[in-house]
Every structure is written in structure tokens, then in C-alpha cells.
Amino acid sequence: MRTDHEVIAKWIKPDSHVLDLGCGDGSLLRTLQDEKNVHGYGLEISAENILRCVENGINVVEQNVDDGLSNFEDQSFDTVIMSQAIQTLRNPDKVLLEMLRVGRQAVITFPNFGHWRARYHLLVKGRMPVSDLLPYEWYNTPNIHFCTFKDFEILCHELNLNVLNREVVAGGSQAGKIKYLLPNLLGETALYRVTKHV
């Protein structure tokens, strides 16, 4: 299981209702169903991934998250997940609020564009970085909103959201989870669990 999925699974309560936005092949939902008896749906736009979800026994809806979540009622899920997709949206701030309208909490993960390798690549080569984590050239990347830990936390503050948990995942020589030591510099993947302030 991917390290970020392990962290997400730790944050999900057994027997809860989960909505996974941009669920890919449904592997995270499949794990949550098997290990935590979670009841859930995935949203996906890729026809290939939708087919894989169906093969994995995942309830999947073909839907573009950028179009909103108006087909879901307020607070109809315990948790809404968006893993490695928020940076690809036209309006991530609006989608984040929608996630917390339909769910009691939201779990968001994204690649940290402030990681030292990205900074080094830009400084030394003068070009946008291409790596295992960011495998696209600037002209064909699905990532349209480059985000760091600090950027996301500022957005949460502006939207009056409460950060319940933050985890930092690193690769390479720092493989695995690291806690709070320079997350903007050392963390390759950011993981947040947030709610609305009450």
C-alpha cells in the first residue's frame, strides 16, 4: 500500500461513509472496504479508471469534481478524500468547501512543490522540475495550481478551516513519514485532515 494511503486509512473510522474524489482505480476505497468495513463511492473522470473501479467492486460515479458536488446532500459522508488531485482543479478553494459541505471532515493529499529537489532543479537547471513525483513537462502537466505546505495552510486559515492532522511523507533517503522538521523543504507529499471551525 502507498505510504499516503496508509496515513489516510489511519484517519478513517471503521463502518464510516466515505466519498473519494478522483479515486483512480479505486484501490484506496477497496482497502478501506476490506480493512475498515467502509461504505463509499468514488468519483472519477477517466474511463479506464472507472472500468478498473468496477472490476475492483467499487461504487463509482463518472463526474468531474470541478463541476461541484451538488448531487450530494449536506453532511452525507463522514469523510471526503481527495488524494493527489487538488492541484489539478480549476477552483481548489471552492472544491475544498464543497468537500466539507458534503462531509464532516476532508482528507487532502498533494505533491509539495516546495520540496528541496524541485527548488534545486529550478535553481540549477532553470527549468520546471520533472521527477517521479512530478513526471510531466510544464506544457502537458495536469497540475495547474502549484502548492506547498505553507500555501495550503494559508488557504485553510482564509477559509476558516481547522487542521486536525498534518503528515509529511518523504522519499529517497528520508523514505517514509517525517513529522514536522522543515515540511516545506523536506516533504514530498502533504497529507491533511481538516474540518470546518464550529
Image (cartoon, rainbow, N blue to C red):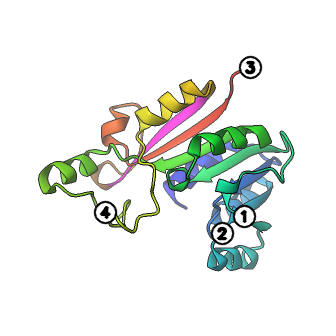
23 with respect to 145 (left or right): right
Around disc 1, counting alpha carbons within 10 Å, would you say few (fewer than 14), some (14 to 19), or many (20 or more)? Answer: some
Residue 82 is at least partly visible in this image: yes
Which corner quadrant holds the C terminus?
A: top right
Around disc 4, counting alpha carbons within 10 Å, would you say few (fewer than 14), some (14 to 19), or many (20 or more)? Answer: few
CA gap between label 2 and label 1 equals 6 Å
Q: Secondary structure at mark 2?
A: loop
The secondary structure that dominates the magenta segment is: strand
C-beta proximity under 8 Å, tags 4 and 1: no
Residue 134 location (% of width, % of height): 37, 60
Q: Which residue is mark 1?
A: 63
Which numbered tag is attached to residue 131? 4
Residue 22: image quadrant is bottom right
- Identify the magenta region: 163-171
Q: Which residue is mark 2?
A: 45
Residue 179 is at least partly visible in this image: no
CA gap between label 3 and label 1 equals 30 Å
* Residue drawn 53% across the image and 48% down it: 109
Q: Is residue 103 above or below residue 84?
A: above
Residue 24: image quadrant is bottom right
